[in-house]
Amino acid sequence: MVYFQRTTKARDAKLYGVAPSGALSSRGLEITGARDATELLAQIHSGAWTAEEVTLAFCKRAITAHQHVNCIVDNDMEAAVERARELDRHFQRTDKNLVGPLHCLPVSIKDLTVVKVLRYTMGYVSWVDNISEEDAVLIETLHISGAVIFVKTTMPQSRMPIDHMWMDVAILNR
């Protein structure tokens, strides 16, 4: 199996166009340039990075990406930062005890999952005013595990059912 090889952080910053804009500090680039969720969580859980600075870095990265590719359907970044502050207070107050295994993991959610107070469109323009009144079980589970939901991202209309039907047929015919 071939894995994606990370290049140098300086090259990544140039490639993604975030360093010259100043949207992210060198610390923000370091945080959002973490190799994977395991590395990110290790830094958070050790106390090297605070929940608030990680959440802010990912919010800034998402805003930068959205300016280039229009990828955000809805967001609640203010609530995400407040949640991160709560997680930081808990971490300090309880002598570095975590809320859960995903303590402060920033998570973006596709538009097919309902998140309380955020739009739920399934890719349909006509559904732009649909606001979720409750969280999906997945969102509740992520929240209990300590994750921070900060944006909902775009998706093809109706989840591209033809692609999914083809995959279902391929799996069933094995």
Image: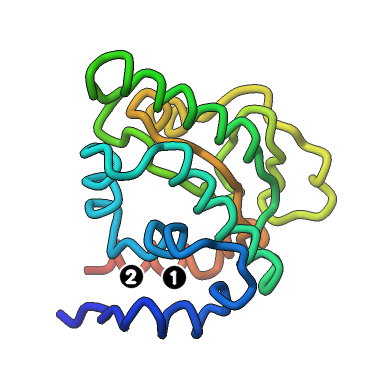
Q: Is residue 130 above or below residue 82?
A: below
The residue pinned by badge 2 equals 170
**Front in this rendered view, residue 44 or 151:** 44
In this view, which residue lies farthest toward the top?
A: 93
Q: Position of residue 97 (x, y in %)?
A: 23, 21
- In the rendered view, how is the structure colored? rainbow
Q: Quadrant of residue 89?
A: top left
Label 1, residues with CA under 10 Å away: few <14, some 14-19, many ≥20: few
Identity, as a three-letter code, of the amino acid under mark 1: Trp
* In this picture, residue 4 sits left or right of residue 154: left
Q: Quadrant of residue 103?
A: top left
* In this picture, residue 59 sits left or right of residue 98: right
Q: Position of residue 113 (x, y in %)?
A: 55, 41
Tell me what residue is drawn at x 38 percent, y 36 percent: 104
**What numbered label is drawn on residue 166?**
1
What whole-number distance in Å separates the C-alpha atoms at marks 2 and 1? 6 Å
Q: Position of residue 49 (x, y in %)?
A: 34, 44
Say which quadrant the N terminus sits in.
bottom left
Callout 2 secondary element? helix
Q: Are marks 2 and 1 in contact (CB under 8 Å)?
A: yes
Say which quadrant the C terminus sits in.
bottom left
